[in-house]
Amino acid sequence: MGIYRDSILPKLCDLSMRNERLHPYRKRVVGAAEGRVLEIGSGSGLNLPFYPPVVREVLALEPDANLLAMARRVPHVEMPVNFIEASAEAIPLDDNSVDTVVTTWTLCTIPEAAAALCEMRRVLRPQGKLLFVEHGLSPDRGVRWWQDNLTPVWRRISGGCHLNRPIQSMIEGAGFGIDRIDTGYMRGPKPMTFMYEGSARPR
């Protein structure tokens, strides 16, 4: 079982996930959630303060008990938060039971990411949405070379993080249709900072 902690990316960039440069991503992605929300790899709870009032419940799924303990101490808006110690590859929820799935800098570390995405699709209601911001495979050949060559070593020293996962095609391959996607580099080393941000719906 992997540890989907959303501290991986800034370690790569020599930044902290608490860095204010990441707040705009969180505000846009998490701020678009509504209804009953499943957050994949909720980590230490850094997204909790960004959920809007239209969210009626957050199910914070995280396989690391220590990170869940930290998340329970995070102040957040007045909404129920239920912490679930479980793997994204086997989400302990019923089919069609959530309105929104949120994933932020998480797909890089999940060992069986394709299976996890299929699980996300399973638990989403037919009109539900997947909101994501992830780092992954760059379209630039030179950057991809570095990503491919660094990943075998990097994944062993950084909690299983892959630098070269093709996020858009992974999401589409799990049965989602992309509604919106924005891509580009954030500041930092290019092999670690090519971002995919957007939303998708079950097909």
Image: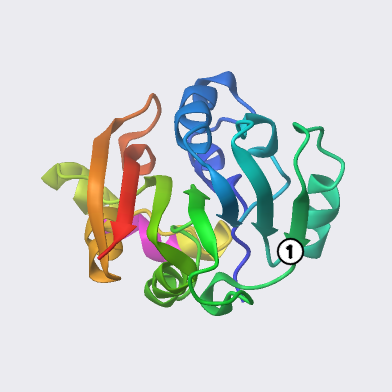
Q: Which residues are magenta?
A: 148-153
Question: Does residue 164 appear anywhere in the picture?
Answer: no
Give the left or right position of residue 37, taking residue 165 as reference: right
| x and y, in percent, of residue 72 in the image | 84, 47
**Picture colour scheme:** rainbow
Report if residue 192 lies within the magenta region: no
Quadrant of image for the C terminus? bottom left
Question: Does residue 175 appear anywhere in the picture?
Answer: yes
Quarter of the image for residue 97 reads bottom right
Name the residue rendered at 53%, 65% in the picture: 156
Quadrant of image for the N terminus? bottom right
- Prevalent SS, magenta region: helix
Identify the amino acid type marked 1: Asp
Furthest residue toward left: 141
Name the residue rendered at 73%, 64% in the picture: 64
Q: Nearer the viewer, residue 121 or 128?
A: 128
| x and y, in percent, of residue 70 in the image | 83, 47
